[in-house]
Amino acid sequence: MTKAGSGKKPPVRVRFYRLRNKLKEKAGGGSGEGGGTISADALAAAQEAFDQAAEDYPDWVKPYIDELYEHFRRCVDTPEQRLQHFAQVRRIAHDLKGQGSTFGYNLMTFFAASLYDFAFQEGEISDNHVELLKAHIDSMNVVIKDRIRGDGGEEGQALQKGLQDAIEKYMNTVE
């Protein structure tokens, strides 16, 4: 305690506690003599599950593509609600861009990232913006429908060029 009128505070005492790293022990590296090991069988099972998920990826993504087309149609039918639909498109594109490359669909990540950036619109959304929305969705649909993996080779380059051409066409003539 401080003495009345002295103005001095007592020294602060600090204690450090070293907690055991139970997670490290569970992983097999608790002895400090090297890391844990994972059996070859466990690795093979994990790889098989991952390969199956990658094979199922197009089937899993197709409903999202359908939902994007529905937002496109709504943008055409109800122009006064385009901002709301573009916000939903951006949400879906965000989900898709984070998963494509994980499963070997790099073009899907490329197109979804482009759509995600593009769908961040403020103010009025013109018919040209809506056409670009469709160009993005069409590109992603081809990747999924044709199960184009990796960079897609020549077909992938043609898809990327087609989207770039659409961007140049419609962005240079934005109403």
Image (tube, grey):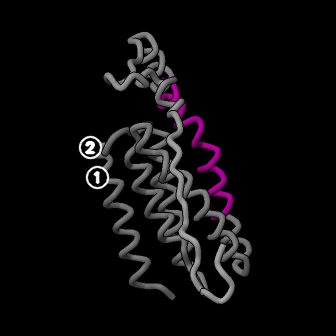
Residue beneath label 1, please?
157
Residue situated in front as seen by the camera: 82 or 21: 21
**Which of the numbered marks, if any, corresponds to residue 4?**
none
The single residue placed furthest to the top in the displayed view is 41
**Viewport quadrant of the N terminus:** bottom right
* In this view, 118 is above or below 108: below
Mark 2: amino acid: Gly
C-beta proximity under 8 Å, tags 1 and 2: yes
* In this view, 171 is above or below 155: below
Residue situated in front as seen by the camera: 50 or 32: 32
Residue 71 sits in quarter: bottom right
Does the magenta portion include 121? no
How far apart marks 1 and 2 lie (CA) works out to 6 Å
Whole-percent x and y of residue 58?
53, 37
The single residue placed furthest to the left in the displayed view is 154
For the magenta stretch, what is the residue range?
Answer: 52-72
Whole-percent x and y of residue 90?
58, 65
Whole-percent x and y of residue 30?
43, 25
Mark 1: amino acid: Gln
**Image point (54%, 61%), residue name:** 13
| Element class at badge 1 | helix
Does the magenta portion include 65? yes
Q: Main secondary structure of the magenta part?
A: helix
**Image point (43%, 10%), residue name:** 41
* In this view, 175 is above or below 132: below
Residue beneath label 2, please?
153
